[in-house]
Each structure stands twice: as structure tokens, then as C-alpha cells.
Amino acid sequence: MSGFRGADKRDMSSSSRRATEKDRSVFLTRMRISVLLSLSFPIFSPAQVSTPSDLTKLDLEDLMNVQVTSVSKREEKVSAAGAAIYVINQEDIRRSGATNIPDLLRMVPGVHVAQMNAHTWAISIRGFTDKYGDKVLVMIDGRSVYTPLTSGVNWDQQDVPLEDIDRIEVIRGPGGTVWGANAVNGVINIITKSAKATPGVLISAGAGSQEGVQGLAQYGGQIGRTGAYRVFADYANLGDSPAPAGETVADGWHKAHVGFRSDWELTPRDALTIQGDLFQSREGQTIDTLLINEFPREAILDDTITVGAGNVLGRWDHTLSNGSGTSLQVYYDGYDRVDRGVGEIRNTVDVDFEHHLTLGARNNMVWGGGYRVTSDDVTPGYAVRYMPAKRTDSLFSTFVQDEIRLTRTLWLTLGTKLEHNSYTGFEYEPSAQLVWNLTTRQTLWASASRAIRQPARADFNILADVAIVPLDNGGFGVVELTGNPNRKAERLYDFEVGYRAQATQRLSLDLATFSSHYYGLQTDELGTPFITTDPGPVHLVIPVIFGDNAHAHNYGAEAFVTWSVGHRWKISPGYSFLQMHVAGDRISQDPAAGEIANESPKHQFQIRSFLNLTRRLEWDTAVYQVGRLTDGGDGSTPGYTRLDSRLGWHAGESVEFSIVGQNLLSPAHAEYHDAFAILHTLVERSVFCKATWHF
Amino acid sequence: MADRLYVTSLLLGTVLLAHAGEPAFDEYQVKAAYLYNFAKFVEWPQSTFANSNDPIGICIVGQNPFGSTLEVMVKGKKIGDRAFVVWRLRDTQQVSKCQILFIGAADQKRIRAWLEALKGADILTVGETEDFTAAGGIIGFRLEGTRVRIQVALETAEHTRLRISSRLLGLAEIVTKQQPIVP
């Protein structure tokens, strides 16, 4: 699994895109020829060759004329993995018509994407959907963007120009052995292209009914004989969305981003990557909040989120004289975010080292270690405070994983992570995976793993005033969510079985099933009420203290098929099923301990179609059917069907125009409910036009 | 209108399906077949094998893009008395058992270093990156439209004791090592 860690730079999809372009012209030419010669003059007749092993019967001359298809690229790349991996490649990104990363993730079976407002998403893998989806680890080029304050990911401040993404690898199921804490239900690795793959000028501009305007300008060049770089700037401005009652809510979004990446081949043995970003964002949201300074006042107000963020990352890949490889990565990441009045300034430095080597004839091993230190300064917001206001945490980690060849077709991977964090001390995350290549076309795999979610700063230190309770004596009480410095890590014991098959040259299938057992999940336990005058006026505080007294047993399955119907038409249906059983332990007093199970749809169905109408014209359509979210106290969200369609036109070698319609089936629908004081808005039907010019 | 377009595209799809009779294989199934075929057209020096029935070792170094395609494809196949054995290696430490050695594009960063380590060895190095032959490899796969073609760096091969048959050379594009790298 370590091979998917983002260091490899295979630009597979761009070569496959080149192949498809030619494919079309070759196909047309051949059609003409076959019509002309009425099939009596075959160029190459491979009728006797229908299975891969027959290929060995061919002469070199014949082999040179065999058509290759790129149908199974994705499956081939992941075919050796003992995990449920889905790779979103460049072609998927370009043809999705998506303008942001969350919309791209909709295509991955098992992932639930729920948009709360123009810039806020609740995204989960295999359940536990939450604005602070705390069980999925997200990384951009090896840099963790999982926030240690609240856990989860601030998706609004993760901006990567989609044109520069090489691929997004989504791993459903635990990845703790390699990636460490919080890779509980899945890992999302966003990997950008090498600067060598993006020479020249790229300009893209778009405008739409909901997206407002957006633009990207990029230049890539060479530095000497061995280096390459790119610099870019992008900007986007999104309009407001409607609220459920029909009125427009000020959730508009302005963001600007400049960044660079440079890749160097210093010596034949040394490759260096240096990259960095500066990002600024301003977003509106309507919140229904208490006001600490004006107790007992509760107000609905328009709030502004502001974000300033920057990072710089360096990675050095070295090949030792024995041929084994090491990789050293160092990054700094800092941001200043104001959200619901809470100001968070955070600085993080991370160092990671990895070494891949072969041991004997049967063992491929990778081991590594890392250190991360993160410090923050958090100022109080309207209703949320952190005590203490400043905190510095460190994380030491080390892991080893060995891939053992048992027989010609049977592989066993064993490994564990051992880490020490400032909250719960030592943690370990072992896993075992067995991969059995039944035939060239079929793989069966099984895995067992333990993963943990490390408590976030909020689990220990938050004080959030969430409700006012009038008292009989004329006074009032405040329900206060209170962090608990004794919280333990959440633990997952996970079992998976999967099957992948290339049924024919045109049809592939991927199936994964899982059974997941969680312990130490969060509960809200009633504390002892007390009277305070800080902040005034005098009032009763009813503390609700975080506990770790819930457990869960979830199971489910995800399946998807890729079918190349012809040279010009590919469809990919997918389905995911999830059954969650969450309950409080006997000692828990939390009556709502099981309600997180209502936040994720039981059934999700999707079908995507990619059709090349002509050599230059593409018509792509995706339908997503997402099941109902039942009422967990915040209101229920009806199931919905979302239809996105894109028409793309290659006007020439370097110019592409596209028109994208999103959510075409209804004027507006809700994907999620109000949460964390934020009032949700609806996702509207929208049309978006885009032009991309590359030279 | 949209309905008609859809029906038209369905029909178009059916027509295409009907015409798409020629089977197409995955890129790596074809590349695997090439690796097998190379063994027929390359002669290794006598000293390479201790016995006349020693197997021919095909090694995949670094990330394996073949899945188990290669293993299954060569299973039971023989050239003369020699069977095949496929090894997957993480690095170039144990290449003494390799007669044919493949490095995939995923390990782009290490290709030069690995080829450096293999310099002059009697191993047929095969790769798929654009600059593989320029970096010191012997045979490079190249995608030409939907077909896989080969390039041979004859000069590099001449520095080893391998003898590549003229039949293979006749079908390949011969490149010199000094050829400029395509940017």
C-alpha cells in the first residue's frame, strides 16, 4: 500500500489521453477502409486471439498491431493492492465538469458528499458523515490537511487547480499502518502533477449561474537541463445560494490562490521537489448562535469566514547504491482562520522519512518515521472558546510494512504503525492484507486492521455554549458542551474482503465488503450544573461533557463496473450500501449516542457515462442517487437524485470549451441539514461555461 | 430533443459495438507478451546459465504495473529447455537472477540510478518512459496511437554480451543513446 503514498509520479492518464485521441482517428480511418474494402482485406486478423495468454502465440510483427485499450488502467494500477482503492484520474477530472474537489469525490462509491452551503461540505467514507468528518485523513502531496483543532477537513481552504491534479487516490477502509492516526474509515490522497508535466501557458476561465466567475493562469518552464517549474494564480467568486424557505442567504465565496511547484533531477540518484502555496478566502454564512458577551441573547446573524493560509514543502528522493530508495519530506503549513468568530492561528512543521527495500527473494519492505509539531493560538468566538487558548502538540511516528510473496500468486502484507501523540500517548495500528491473484484477470483480497482516531483539540479543550434554558426562578441556564481531557482514542477493528475482475477486455468489476467495529466513540454525558458570573450575568451552566462511551458495528459493500461499450462510449455504474449500528455503552447516559447513524445514507447509486460524439465533441453525464438522511435531531434530509451533464468541444489542439449543467433535475435541493450553528442552504440547478487554452 | 440525442447516441453506441470486433488488450497484457517474446530473440552468453535447463528470469523492479499478468502468461511456457520465472524486486540488489528486467514509469525518479547500477550487465533492460533508452536502457516501449511499439538502443546493447536477433532489430526503431530527450 505504501506505493500509493504519493511519491510516484506516473503520469498514466495523460499518456492514455493521447492514446484515446489517436484512437478515434485510427478508428475512423479503419472504418473507412473496411467500408471500402468490404472487410475482404483484413489488415490484421486476430480472431484466434481472444485471451491474454493467447498473446504469447503471436509473432512480434502481430504483437505490434495489437490494439491496446486503456479500460483497465485504473484496475491494473490497483490490482496488486489489498485494499479498496479508487483512483480519480485526469480524464475523470476533466470530464466530470466539476469545479471543486468535493464534487469530484462524489464519483467514488462509498464516499458520501453532502454540501451544506456554497463553501462547506460534510464528507465521509463508510459512514459517520459530519461537518467535521473526523474519520477520514486527507493529504495534498503528502501534506496532511486534517485539522487538529476540530478534526475533519476545512474543505473551503483546500484549493488545488484541478488542471494540475495528477490523480486522487481514495482508499476506503483503514490506512493507519502507513498513514497513522485518523486514517480510520479512509484516506484521500490528492497528488499534483510534476512540474515537468505542465510546460507552457495554461489559461482557463469560466463563468456560470452559481459559480460566478473563476480563472486560472499558469506558466511552466525549465530551469537548466534538469529542472522544471510552474507558477500559477487562480481566483474564484461564487454567488449566494437559496435557503430552504426560499430567501437568499449570504454564503458567497471569494478565493484567491497563488502557488508554485518545481521538480529537479539533481543527479541520476537524486530528485527534488519544492512546492508552495499562498491562499486567501472570504466566505459568508448565516449562523444561529448564542452570544457569550450578551447572555442570554441568541441571534441569527450573517458571519464572515476569513482564511489566510500558506505552505511550503520539500521532498528529496534518493536512490542508494544498492538500488533501494529513500524519501525525505519536510513541510511547513500555517493558517489563520476566523470562523463563527473563533480565530485560529496554527503553525505546523512535519518531517517524514521512508525507505523501500528488497529483503531476500520474497520480501519487499518499507519502513519510516516522522515527527510533527503543531502549535495554535485560538481566540474566543460568539459561543465557542478553547481553554487553554494556546497549545503545542507533537507527534512521533514510526512504521514498518513488509510485502511477502508466499507463492507465485499469493501475497501477504504485514505491518504496523507505532506513534506517540500529546493526547493519548502511545498508539499502534497494525494490519494484515492477503492478496490472491486467482488468474490474470481476477484478484481476491482480504484484510484485517486496527486504526485509531486521535482526539482533537476540541475533544479536550472546547467550551461551546449551545442552548439557553429558561429557569423557573426567572434566571436562565446555558447548556455548555465541554471538552474532556480524559478522552481516549477511538478504536476501529476492521475486516474487509474484496474482489476485482477484468471480466472481458471491455468490462471490469470491483467489489469490496467490510465489517467494522468501533469502540470509544464520542458521547455527550451530563455533568454537574454550577452557577457562574463569568461571563455575566449570573447564570446556571449545565455542562455536557464529551465521553467515549459509544460503540458501533457497521457493515456494507461497494461495487462499481467500468464498461467500454465501444471505442467511443464508456459507462461506469456504482452502488454502495451501508448499515450502521451505533449505540451507547451501558455506562453512557447519552440518549442520542446512536444518532450519528442517521447522518449517512444507506444506499447510494450512481452511473457515469462518457461519450465521444465525434473526434472533437464529448458528452458526459453523471447521475447520483443519494438515500435519505433520517432525522437525528437536526431534521431529516430527503433523498435526492442529482444529474450533471457536460458537453466538451476540442476546438483545436490547444483549446477546449465546455458547458456544464449541474443538478439539472430540480431547481434546488438540500444535501444536508443545519449543523454546528450553521444554517444550511440549497444546492441549485446551475450552468457553467469554461474555456481552457494551453500553449 | 435531449431524448432524441440520447436515443441517437444509444444507436451510435450499438453500431460501434457491432463494429468493434477486433479485440483490444490492456496495455500491460501486450507489454507482458513482448517481454516473453524478447526471450526468443535475444541470446545470452553461455556463462549466464549454469545448466541448460535453468529458467529465464524476468524481473520487475519497483512498482509492478502488470498485476499477475506476466506470471500467468509465462506459466508453463518454455523456450528450448528453459522455463520462465518472474521476480518482483523493490530495487536492483538481487539482479543476478534476472535475464530480462523491466522498470515501469512509476519509478521514473530511480530509473537512471538503477540503469547505472546495471551498466554492462548481461541483462536486457526494458522500460516504458520516454527517455528510457537515453538513460541507458536497451529496449523502450512506446505507445503509437493504440499500439505498443519498441525502440532499441543498439549502442547500449553492444556494451553487453547480449545478442539481439536481426529480426527484432528489423521491427524496432533503432535509437542512439545520445538522442536528445524529448521535453
Image (cartoon, rainbow, N blue to C red):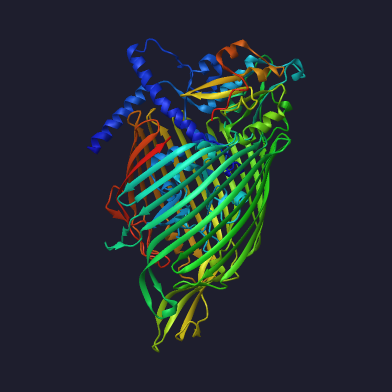
Query: Residue A246, relative to residue B179: is it above or below?
Result: below
Quarter holding residue A163: top left
> Percent x, y for residue A298?
38, 76
Residue beneath the point at 42% across and 49% down? A100
**Quarter of the figure that contains the C terminus of chain A:** top left
> Percent x, y for residue A278?
50, 53
In the picture, measured across the screen, residue A587 lies left or right of residue A693, that is right
What is the count of numbered marks? 0
> Percent x, y for residue A355?
68, 43
In front: A118, or A516? A118
> Percent x, y for residue A209?
30, 50
In the picture, measured across the screen, residue A185 lies left or right of residue A571, that is right
Residue beneath the point at 41% across and 28% down? A21
Residue B67 in view: no
Spot the residue most to the bottom: A473
Residue A373 in view: yes
Spot the residue most to the left: B1
In front: A96, or A547? A96
Query: Residue B168, relative to residue A570: is it above or below?
Result: above
Residue beneath the point at 54% across and 69% down? A547
Query: Residue A78, relative to residue A212: is it above or below?
Result: above
**Quarter of the figure that contains the N terminus of chain A:** top right
